[in-house]
Amino acid sequence: MILTVSVREDLHALAVQHAVRGRGRELHIVESDAIGGRRTLSWRSHRDGPPGSGRPATVLTSEGVEVAVEEADVLWWRRPRADQAVSAGAGSAHERSLVDNDCRGALGGILAASFRGSWISPADATDRAADKVFQLAVARDCGFRVPRTLISQSRAEVVDFVRETGRTIVKPVVGARGPSLWTRMLDDPGSIPAPSFEVCPAVYQEYIEGCRHIRLNSFGERMYAALIETEDLDWRPDLEVPIRPWPVPAELRARVAEVLRRLGLPMGIVDLKLTPDDEPVWLEVNPQGQFLFLEPLTGEPLTEHFADFLLSSTAGGGPA
């Protein structure tokens, strides 16, 4: 059995669930934003009595089925940190925070204490790999060219960085739920008031020339990439551009695999950019990035590939 932790109505989770069930295996979704307001979680520190007695840790699925955590072979840790839908109607900000934090903490703690199968991907590795600074350092150690990068709150440092580096982009360090914050070109940092920089750190990065972007989906030992051709700095707002499957060269495949191995990630969604000289430049990896949108654009059955990957990670090693 596979457990998936994600938000309600997550298309990725639902599509993969359908694919897994089509193979005669079971995948249950635990909605991380629907824990509050119903009897979703249960765990005891002691299960007294003879072996086999006592109540195991259980979770309630999106379909209202109670399942024992220890019966799962694979845990797809997709979208675990979400505010609770029920907390939106709570009284004070403090009360909403209590509901959100306790539901989030109980879910993570119960799974960490009770699940004994394969994590896709481990919670601690997911958190660490999501750190853009850390993953850039690992990618560079693995032989990738990475953009010259500054994280700062100082206008003077940013001005100096732009002067030394040339064309520079700016993007969030982590970002926030809600409207997407697209990557932007930073033209004249000296014209921006210093307090604007001091509000919070941001990522200032060397602009990589070229118009060929690579979205690489690594599912275990298999990799499926798309080439996205656009002059836009950030390709995400406009998918009406040429997008096609891109065969991953063996050398690049090996380097990506080594980065993910060092990050402790069985899977990862990697963004690269090809320079005019065809050099792949590492931009970032999202431990649980979006891939479903590429399926109709490239014709690559990524949902089926990912279902195969999850099933290959189970105790049975594949479809029944």
Image: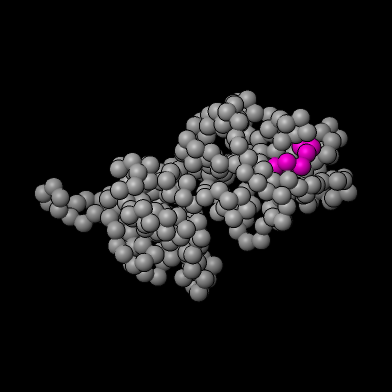
Q: How many marks?
A: 0
Q: Residue 308's x, y, as percent? A: 42, 46
Rendered position, 220 above or below 23: above
Which residue is at 61% across, 50% downward?
A: 298
Name the residue nearer the viewer: 225 or 280.
225
Q: Residue 22's x, y, as percent? A: 38, 56
Rendered position, 128 above or below 4: above
Which residue is at 67% across, 43% downward?
A: 227
Asked if residue 239 lies left or right of residue 111, the reply is right
Rendered position, 276 above or below 75: above
Work out whether residue 320 can be spotted.
yes
Work out whether residue 125 can be spotted.
no
Is residue 17 located in the magenta-colored stretch of the structure?
Answer: no
Q: How are the colours assigned in the image?
A: one colour
Question: Magenta part of the protein: which range?
Answer: 207-213
Q: Residue 111's x, y, as percent? A: 36, 50
Magenta segment's dominant SS is: loop
Q: Residue furthest left?
A: 50
Q: Residue 277's x, y, as percent? A: 76, 30
Which residue is at 72% across, 56% downward?
A: 240
Asked if residue 98 lies left or right of residue 133, the reply is left
Rendered position, 245 above or below 18: above
Which residue is at 34% across, 47% downward?
A: 319
Name the residue nearer the viewer: 33 or 243.
243
Q: Residue furthest front?
A: 299
Name the residue nearer the viewer: 34 or 106.
34
Asked if residue 206 lies left or right of residue 284, the reply is right
Name the residue nearer the viewer: 267 or 181.
267
